Amino acid sequence: MSSEMVFEMKQRSAKEVQEMLQVWESSVRATHDFLKEKDIESLKPLVKIGLTQVETMVCVKDDNMIKAFMGIDKGKIEMLFIKDEYRGNGIGKKLILYAIDKYNIKYVDVNEQNKKAVGFYIHLEFKEFDRSEIDEQGNPFPIIHMKLS
């Protein structure tokens, strides 16, 4: 029986940040096949900072293990990552619905090359309203800016 729970992390311990970084890496390796090893390694320190600085962090935990997390800042989902072995089980949808219900989120940015994520957000009624040729770090990974319709 799963004891899966959604909860908010006000304070994030070093252990929790490390655990979320592992979830991020597992997710990225499974879904971001356009990234090379050097890209993942160069993003890791930036993600670690983001994990401590994003305004609101919501996690899905099961048996005290983080399976997924979502960072929210000013009405926008800044990050949503699910450990690879738990993808496709409704956790992402659960987090998005939580964010819509509790935080009235309207926006998300998605790597254009991460086709499954783009499809996931379209399925949840997000629509593309803008596009950037480069990501926030200036890398040539196009970003789709989406808004809840």
Image (tube, rainbow, N blue to C red):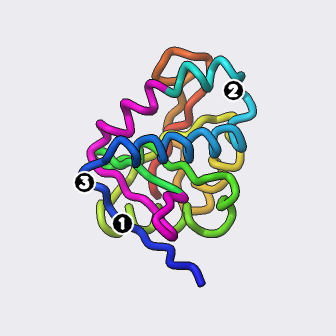
Q: Residue furthest right?
A: 33
Residue that carries the numbered disc 1 in the rendered image:
7
Is residue 85 magenta-colored? no
The boundaries of the magenta stretch are 45-67
Query: Front-most of 31 and 76?
Result: 31
Q: Secondary structure at mark 3?
A: loop
Residue at 31% of width from left, 47% of height from top?
Answer: 12
Q: Amino acid at mark 3?
A: Lys
Say which element carries label 2. Answer: loop
10 Å crowding of disc 3: few (<14), some (14-19), many (20+): few
Left or right of 14 on screen, residue 131:
right
Q: Does the CB distance between marks 3 and 2 fall below 8 Å?
A: no
Extreme residue in the bottom direction: 1
At a point 55% along the width and 36% down the height, the residue shown is 144
Q: Is the residue marked by circle 2 packed among few (<14), some (14-19), or many (20+) residues within 10 Å?
A: some
Identify residue type, mark 2: Leu
Residue 74 lies, in percent from the top left, at 27, 46
Disc on the earlier residue, 3 or 2: 3
Q: Is residue 95 above or below residue 21?
A: below
The reply to whether discs 1 and 2 touch (Cβ–Cβ < 8 Å) is: no
Residue under label 2, please give it. Answer: 35
Question: Residue under circle 3?
Answer: 10
Helix, strand, or loop for circle 1? strand
Across and down, in percent, residue 106 comes to: 38, 53
Which label's residue is closer to the chain start, 1 or 2?
A: 1
Mark in front: 1 vs 2: 1
